[in-house]
Amino acid sequence: MDLLSSMRISATGLDAQETRMNTISSNIANAESVGYKRKDAVLTPNTDRANFGEILQNEVDEHAQGVLVTDVVEDTKPARLVYDPQNPKQRGDGYVEMPNVNTVEEMANMINASRAYEANITAMNAAKSMAMKALDIGK
């Protein structure tokens, strides 16, 4: 794997984690917005291989291209029901359908995305450092 490939893989990881963090932030911001549905980013690997078996046949996957956010989907969990008969958006029986967002879970997801972002930055800096050392050898 060359320098540009490793940088490209880290860059796609940074982009994917940024999208995840934005989605999670939106979920937290709308945790009390009536009618909002939790959203989640769908990440998929980006390779030019057809299946996982082809990837395993080689010791080093020289064709890895990183990760992509293919979609941002709504969560299918049911809404949280809150009894509030005075709310104009209550559904007739006094219950209001609140978002299916668990802020504790979202904060854990945010920490996970943040750590993954940091890991991609560390990998990119390591590749940059190796390139600089290689240039120093040529002096």
Image (cartoon, grey):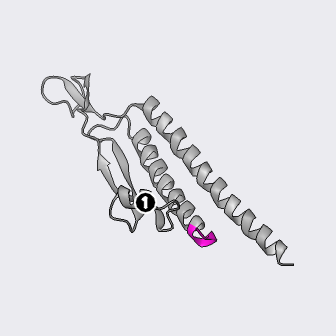
- Secondary structure under the numbered disc 1 in the rendered image: helix
Q: Is residue 80 magenta?
A: no
Q: Is residue 32 left or right of residue 116?
A: left
Instruction: Tell me the chief SS of the magenta region.
Output: helix
User: Quick one: 18 or 7, which is closer to the camera?
Assistant: 7
Please identify the residue farthest to the bottom as the structure is shown: 139
- Residue 20 vs 33, above or below: the answer is below
Q: Residue at x 51, y 57 (%)?
A: 13
- Residue 38 vs 96, above or below: the answer is below
Q: Is residue 3 magenta?
A: yes
Q: Is residue 46 left or right of residue 99?
A: right
Give percent across and percent down for residue 96: 23, 29
Q: Residue at x 33, y 41 (%)?
A: 38
- Residue 27 vs 122, above or below: the answer is above
Give percent across and percent down for residue 61: 49, 63
Q: Residue at x 25, y 23 (%)?
A: 84
Q: Which residue is mark 1?
A: 57
Q: Quadrant of residue 102?
A: top left
Q: Is residue 68 visible?
A: no
Give percent across and percent down for residue 72: 34, 53
Give percent across and percent down for residue 123: 64, 56
How many C-alpha atoms fall within 10 Å of the one at disc 1: few (<14), some, or many (≥20)? few
Q: Is residue 133 left or right of residue 2?
A: right
Please identify the residue farthest to the right as the structure is shown: 139
Q: Amino acid at mark 1?
A: Gln
Start and end of the magenta stretch?
Answer: 1-5
